[in-house]
Image (cartoon, rainbow, N blue to C red):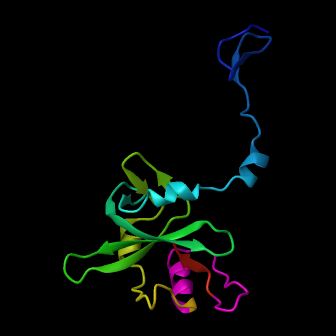
Amino acid sequence: MEAHTSDTIETNETNEETTAPPPDNSEAAATEPAVMHREIAEWHGRDLVDRDGERIGKLEEVYFDIETDEPQFGTVKEGFVGRHLTFVPLTGITIGPNNLQVPVTKEQVKNAPNIELQGGELSQADESALYHHYQLNYTPPDNQTGRRLARR
């Protein structure tokens, strides 16, 4: 076998280059949080764009899943007159240098349920409506409030 300067290229017996499989980091990935919480604090005020790169708005608040402690939804202000908060899923987000890209379309965000916050919390019915609108799995947690999301 010939020595190469690249770690990912190997030469087999017929001198054809093949790509070596990436190292298996599945165990490390399972124990690492998907997104570091200190990074999330830096998200506030950043532009959210949809999966096609269209601007949705600026991120206002982040709501976490109380069981996994992972960010699930963010809010953006929509409209020019009578602006209201709209919830956008943050699962599968791509963090770019100038924006945060969410894996949904601007149209899906535009058609999201209108939800009025009461004391900064969503009702269980509102949570369920959000998860179902974005076709995300929703199971109410077994806790006193029956709610899954908490704002931070």
In the rendered image, the vertical position of residue 140 relative to residue 80, given as above or below: below
The residue lying toward the viewer, choosing from 99 and 1, is 99
Left or right of 23, for residue 124: left
Q: Position of residue 6 (x, y in %)?
A: 65, 17
Q: Position of residue 73 (x, y in %)?
A: 50, 71
Residue drawn at (63%, 56%) of the image? 34
Residue drawn at (29%, 74%) of the image? 78
Q: Position of residue 4 (x, y in %)?
A: 68, 11
Residue drawn at (51%, 72%) of the image? 152
The tally of labels here is 0
The residue range painted magenta reads 125-146
Left or right of 112, for residue 25: right
**Residue 101 sits in quarter:** bottom left
Q: Residue furthest top?
A: 2
**Quarter of the image that includes the N terminus:** top right
Question: Is 104 within the magenta?
Answer: no
Question: Is 139 within the magenta?
Answer: yes
In the rendered image, the vertical position of residue 73 relative to residue 2, given as above or below: below
In the rendered image, the vertical position of residue 93 relative to residue 144, given as above or below: above
**Residue 148 sits in quarter:** bottom right
Q: Residue furthest left?
A: 81
Q: Position of residue 72 (x, y in %)?
A: 55, 69
Residue drawn at (55%, 63%) of the image? 91
**Residue 87 sits in quarter:** bottom left
